[in-house]
Each structure stands twice: as structure tokens, then as C-alpha cells.
Image (cartoon, rainbow, N blue to C red):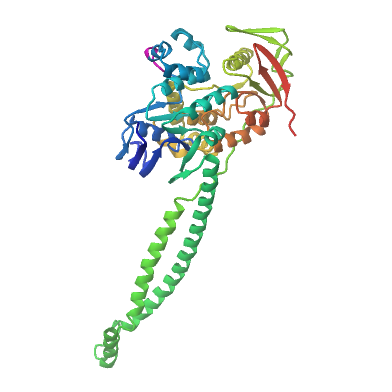
């Protein structure tokens, strides 16, 4: 089994981009788990594809990736691979099936599983292959607390080189021994888990700001000195110049010649040239440090959701509600008021998304203005979103880019990119529909795929929402910050809880 994976002098640039995404990148991965963290669009998934060999770098090498397996953010797999795993009765396969609590017996059952249950099967298949390098991209997205713990336990049993791309702070802190931080124009690998690396990152950022301030002060001093030297050199030049002297003024010309021979007056020009070189070097140093300074961003968007004039947006007062193949008993009357803030919670596969889609259909039939953010966008849907954005008038496009920036992404990525990441797709969808003035927002796992900075920006934006809000989320902090009421799915029963926030 390989002990190391190395990235050497790697540069990569998309054809549609004006600057490289990575330039002269050097990283080293050893056994144990290394986290890769950064904003949406910072290049995490692209780096994963370069490591796996799915895309080829513009220059540089990736060594030690001959035996590698990756799990991306989707759940696609072939029936052949699933069938082979389910009917494999080896000790290795059995261990991972047991640890990840895989219970299905046939390929046909797979399509009826929740997203989180499918992710556990994908991880079990990857772990059973016993590869040298395992790369996981957001493994705990869409998982309830129980499934998340199952994933953590399984990851910790892996003995090879593990690379974990995640925005899950708890997972990163529990399993990683080092983290790669992708910042603007600055990529570094730091020892320790995410929290330890974040502390070091903040300290380094403060040091870079301090270095920049020193460089700026030095450059300003040199600018002032250069201005003085130029004035002296100009006077010296006039002193040595014969321009304007009478041709018969032999004494005057002799004095000018003597000044040139002795070089006393020429020294001012030489000193000026020295200061010019020092000033140029100082400016270059200041520019280099400036390029690595932490970004200052004004995050958060203003929703144009309006409080409905209706007394009630939704009411259901039967004892049971039947949706598709699911039926739930109700311990309370379902009611959504114009100012309701409701979180639908429960384990994977309980039916949370089913209830949300039912509400969407109901609002659609009643003609109530709503905005629905689905849990996932397909590749085709992401492509359609990008095309919709690209076809906007320039003025509207500028407004959308401003909203995207305030949700924590680089607007340049959306102008140059040919494909969107799942997190970028969510931000673009919200930015495109921000002025629809819905009376109710319905959000299915809105924090999935969002980096921590973007998550906090969205959370802040929704705090002042004037319309009704219904959200599905496993992020407990997000739920408790925004919701006043919780509809909890427990054993095919819907239970109401009120969240009292101080």
C-alpha cells in the first residue's frame, strides 16, 4: 500500500478563465485524513479531479494516485457495481456492510432509499475496495445525526491516505490530522484538525496584514525620498548643462566640464537611480503581499419576500395525511401563517422532502406566490441555470452578480465558468429569484454544499425575512436560529415542537 501522495509544481487553468486556478501548487499527503476546505468555487472539487486523474494539469505532476477511489457529491452508480457489492459475501465486504448499517438485499431497493442512505452504500463500496487513497467529497451532506455518526466511525477505520472535502466542522475536527486551506491566491497545508488550522490561518492572515502595512509605509517613505532626489538631480543637471551658454564663455564652459569630470554634481543622478530601483522593488513587494491578504466581504442579501394578507396560507386538520406511498399520523393541526417560521426535521428517509413537495404543490394550486429551493439540482438543471444567467441583460446580470458576491462567491467564477458546483448552483438560483416577492419560502436542505462563510451569510439574510419560511435541514444550529416551530417526523408520526429563542 502506498504511503504518500504528492502534488508537484501543479498549474491548472480552465480555457474559459483569464487566470490559473492553481499555479505552482505543491502538496504532500500521508496516511491519515487530510481535510480540504475553502469557499464555494475556490477549486476544491477541481483539485479532487486533478488528484484522481479525471482532468490533466496544465503542467506539473500528481504522484502516488495509482490506487485511488473517490466519492463525489452525487449518488450515481452502475447496477453492476451495486449488484456485485450486495452479493459479495467476503469478510471485507461484510465488515463495511455491518459498520455502515447497509440493510438492502436487492438492487431494486436502491431507488427507494433516501439520499443519505445511498451515500452510506457508496462509502461502503469504496471502503471495501481497500484502495491506497480514498477521496470523499462532502460525505455527510443530507445525513441526519445518526447517519453522520455512522459515517464518522467508518471513516476512522480507514487505514490509508484519506482526503476529505467538507464544510462539516465537527467531522473535520474529529477525523483530520491536517487541513489544506484554499484561500484567494494563497493555499497552505497546516497540521492539526480544522479548528487548529483555522486559528493558525487567522494568525497568518494577521501577520500578512502586518507585513503589508510595513511594506506600504516603506514604499511611501521611498516615494517621498525619490521625489526629493529627482528634484536634486534636476537641479544638478541644470548645473552641468551647457545649454544657454555663450560659445565664447570659456570660463563658464570650463566650470561645467570640471563638474562633469569630478562627478560631484552627477552623484545626485546616481542616487536618484538607486532610489528608483529600491522604490520599484518596494512596490513589487507590497503588491505581492497585497495579493495574499484575506478578503474583506460585506455578506448577506435582502429578501423581497412579503407578508401575505391572507389569514392562513395552509391548513390541514385531519388525523392522518397520505402523500405518495407514505402516510403520517398527526398530533396537531398543520397550519402555516403569513409569518410562520417552520423547520421540518427527522431522520433520513422519514419523508421530510415529500411533505415539502406536497406543500409546493398546494401553494401552486392555490396561486400563492412561493419560492422553492430543491435539495439538489441535476447537471442539466445546473446547466440551464447558468444559461439563464448568461442570457440576462447586462444591467440585470450585474445585480445578480452582486447578490452572488454577498452570498460568499467570486462573481468572476460565474462569468467565466462553463459548469457550476452544487453550492454555486444554489446561490445562483437564489440570486436569480430574489425579486420574485414570494409569500412563502420553501427550502430543502439549503445549507448543503455551502461553505461556512456562505452558510452564515444565508442565515443572516433569512433572519429578517418578512414572509413565511418552511425549511428542511439537519443543521441544528441553522434550525434553532431561524425556526420558531418544528414539525418533527418520528415513526410515521408528525409531532409539533415550539422553539423558544431568547
Q: Position of residue 285 (x, y in %)?
A: 41, 59
Q: Position of residue 78 (x, y in %)?
A: 38, 15
Between residues 434 and 375, which one lies in front from this camera angle? 375
Tell me if residue 460 comes above or below residue 99 in the rendering.
Answer: below
Tell me if residue 200 comes above or below residue 135 in the rendering.
Answer: below
Tell me if I can see residue 336 in this picture.
Answer: no
Q: Which of the 4 quarters of the picture holds residue 133?
A: top left
Q: Which of the 4 quarters of the picture holds residue 479?
A: top right
- The magenta-colored residue range is 76-80
- In the picture provided, is 500 more to the left or to the right than 105? right
Q: Quadrant of the C terminus?
A: top right
Q: Quadrant of the N terminus?
A: top left
- For the image shown, how many numbered marks are present on the structure? 0
Tell me if residue 396 comes above or below residue 288 in the rendering.
Answer: above
Tell me if I can see residue 131 in this picture.
Answer: yes
Between residues 275 and 430, which one lies in front from this camera angle? 275
Membership of 78 in magenta stretch: yes
Between residues 39 and 401, which one lies in front from this camera angle? 39
- In the picture provided, is 62 more to the left or to the right than 285? left
- In the picture provided, is 501 more to the left or to the right than 187? right
> Furthest residue to the bottom?
251
Membership of 38 in magenta stretch: no
Q: Magenta residues: mostly which secondary structure?
A: loop
Between residues 230 and 146, which one lies in front from this camera angle? 146
Q: Position of residue 267 (x, y in %)?
A: 34, 79
Q: Which of the 4 quarters of the picture holds residue 490?
A: top right
Amino acid at each position: 500500500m502506498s504511503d504518500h501522495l504528492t502534488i508537484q509544481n501543479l498549474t491548472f487553468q480552465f480555457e474559459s478563465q483569464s487566470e490559473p486556478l492553481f499555479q505552482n501548487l505543491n502538496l504532500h499527503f500521508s496516511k491519515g485524513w487530510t481535510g480540504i476546505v475553502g469557499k464555494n468555487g475556490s477549486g476544491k472539487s477541481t483539485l479532487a479531479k486533478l488528484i484522481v486523474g479525471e482532468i490533466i494539469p496544465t503542467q506539473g505532476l500528481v504522484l502516488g494516485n495509482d490506487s485511488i477511489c473517490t466519492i463525489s457529491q452525487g449518488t450515481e452508480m452502475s447496477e453492476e457495481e451495486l449488484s456485485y457489492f450486495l452479493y459479495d459475501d467476503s469478510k471485507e465486504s461484510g465488515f463495511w456492510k455491518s459498520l455502515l448499517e447497509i440493510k438492502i438485499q436487492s438492487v431494486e431497493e436502491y431507488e427507494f432509499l433516501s439520499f443519505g442512505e445511498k451515500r452510506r452504500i457508496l462509502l461502503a463500496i469504496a471502503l471495501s475496495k481497500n484502495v491506497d487513497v480514498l477521496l470523499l467529497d462532502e460525505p455527510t451532506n443530507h445525513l441526519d445525526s445518526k447517519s453522520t455518526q455512522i459515517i464518522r466511525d467508518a471513516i476512522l477505520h480507514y487505514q490509508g491516505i484519506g482526503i476529505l472535502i467538507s464544510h462539516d466542522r465537527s467531522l473535520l475536527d474529529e477525523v483530520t490530522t491536517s487541513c489544506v486551506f484554499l484561500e484567494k491566491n494563497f493555499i497552505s497545508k497546516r497540521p492539526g484538525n480544522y479548528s487548529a488550522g483555522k486559528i493558525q490561518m487567522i494568525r497568518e492572515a494577521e501577520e500578512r496584514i502586518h507585513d503589508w502595512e510595513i511594506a506600504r509605509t516603506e514604499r511611501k517613505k521611498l516615494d517621498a525620498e525619490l521625489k526629493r532626489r529627482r528634484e536634486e538631480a534636476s537641479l544638478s543637471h541644470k548645473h552641468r548643462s551647457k545649454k544657454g551658454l555663450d560659445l565664447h564663455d570659456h570660463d563658464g564652459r570650463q566650470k561645467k566640464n570640471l563638474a562633469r569630470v569630478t562627478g560631484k554634481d552627477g552623484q545626485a543622478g546616481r542616487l536618484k537611480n538607486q532610489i528608483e530601483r529600491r522604490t520599484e522593488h518596494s512596490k513589487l513587494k507590497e503588491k505581492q503581499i497585497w495579493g495574499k491578504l484575506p478578503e474583506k466581504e460585506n455578506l448577506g442579501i435582502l429578501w423581497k419576500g412579503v407578508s401575505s394578507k391572507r389569514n392562513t396560507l395552509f391548513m390541514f386538520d385531519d388525523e392522518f395525511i397520505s402523500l405518495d406511498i407514505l402516510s403520517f399520523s398527526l398530533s396537531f393541526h398543520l397550519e402555516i401563517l403569513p409569518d410562520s417560521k417552520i423547520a421540518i426535521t427527522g431522520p433520513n428517509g422519514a419523508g421530510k422532502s415529500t411533505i415539502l413537495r406536497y406543500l409546493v404543490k398546494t401553494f401552486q394550486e392555490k396561486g400563492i406566490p412561493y419560492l422553492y429551493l430543491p435539495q439538489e439540482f441535476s447537471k442539466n438543471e445546473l446547466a440551464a441555470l447558468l444559461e439563464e444567467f448568461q442570457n440576462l441583460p447586462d444591467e440585470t446580470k450585474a445585480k445578480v452578480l452582486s447578490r452572488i458576491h454577498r452570498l460568499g462567491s467570486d462573481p468572476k467564477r460565474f462569468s467565466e465558468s462553463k459548469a457550476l458546483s452544487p453550492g454555486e448552483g444554489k446561490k445562483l438560483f437564489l440570486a436569480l429569484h430574489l425579486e420574485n416577492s414570494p409569500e412563502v419560502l420553501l427550502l430543502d436542505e439549503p445549507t448543503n454544499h455551502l461553505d461556512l462563510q456562505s452558510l452564515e451569510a444565508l442565515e443572516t439574510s433569512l433572519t429578517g425575512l418578512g414572509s413565511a419560511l418552511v425549511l428542511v435541514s439537519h443543521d441544528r444550529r441553522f434550525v434553532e436560529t431561524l425556526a420558531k416551530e418544528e414539525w418533527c417526523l418520528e415513526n410515521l408520526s408528525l409531532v409539533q415542537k415550539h422553539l423558544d429563542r431568547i
